[in-house]
Image (spheres, rainbow, N blue to C red):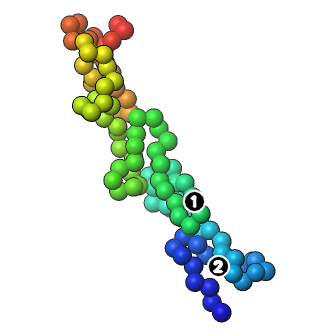
Amino acid sequence: MPQICLSGLLPNYLSLKSNVIADDNECLKSNGGCLDDCINTAGSYYCACLKNGYEIARDNKTCIDIDECDFSKRVCADHLICINTIGSYTCMNIATGMPSGV
């Protein structure tokens, strides 16, 4: 009798038990389509971003810069303005125009 498996799972033809199903590691095929890291899970997978300051995009494959200066986040003190940079941010002193701590 043929086995019917859920997406991400394969029949385990090496098993002596005919009802055992093995995981299909999608990450082994073109990194699962992920542009950074591919994490295999039982029956599925997901993409992740390894570098700090990046998050997974809406396509669930691409890593994009996190805007640490988004108005909903408070990363700099009140007298400093936040400047978003690729993968990070800088707090700039309003009075001096210099990065904080300089």
Mark 1 = which residue?
41
Which labelled disc corresponds to residue 11?
A: 2
Residue found at the far right of this picture: 16
Estimate the x, y position of residue 60 in percent, counting from the top left: 39, 55
Q: Is residue 41 above or below residue 80?
A: below
Q: Is residue 63 above or below residue 73?
A: below
Q: Residue at x 61, y 75 (%)?
A: 10
Estimate the x, y position of residue 46 in percent, counting from the top left: 49, 56
Estimate the x, y position of residue 57 in percent, counting from the top left: 35, 50
Could you tell me the amino acid type at mark 1? Thr
Could you tell me the amino acid type at mark 2? Pro
- Left or right: residue 28 versus residue 69 is right
Q: Is residue 42 above or below residue 102?
A: below
* Mark 1 vs 2, N-terminal side: 2
Secondary structure, mark 2, is: strand
Q: How many marks?
A: 2
Q: Residue at x 27, y 24 (%)?
A: 83
Residue 84 appears in the figure: no
Residue 5 appears in the figure: yes
Q: Residue at x 79, y 80 (%)?
A: 16
The quarter in which the N terminus is drawn is: bottom right
10 Å neighbourhood of mark 2: few (<14), some, or many (≥20)?
some
**Disc 1 and disc 2: Cα gap in Å?**
16 Å
The quarter in which the C terminus is drawn is: top left
Front-most of residues 15 and 33: 15
- Left or right: residue 77 versus residue 17 is left
Cβ–Cβ below 8 Å for labels 1 and 2? no
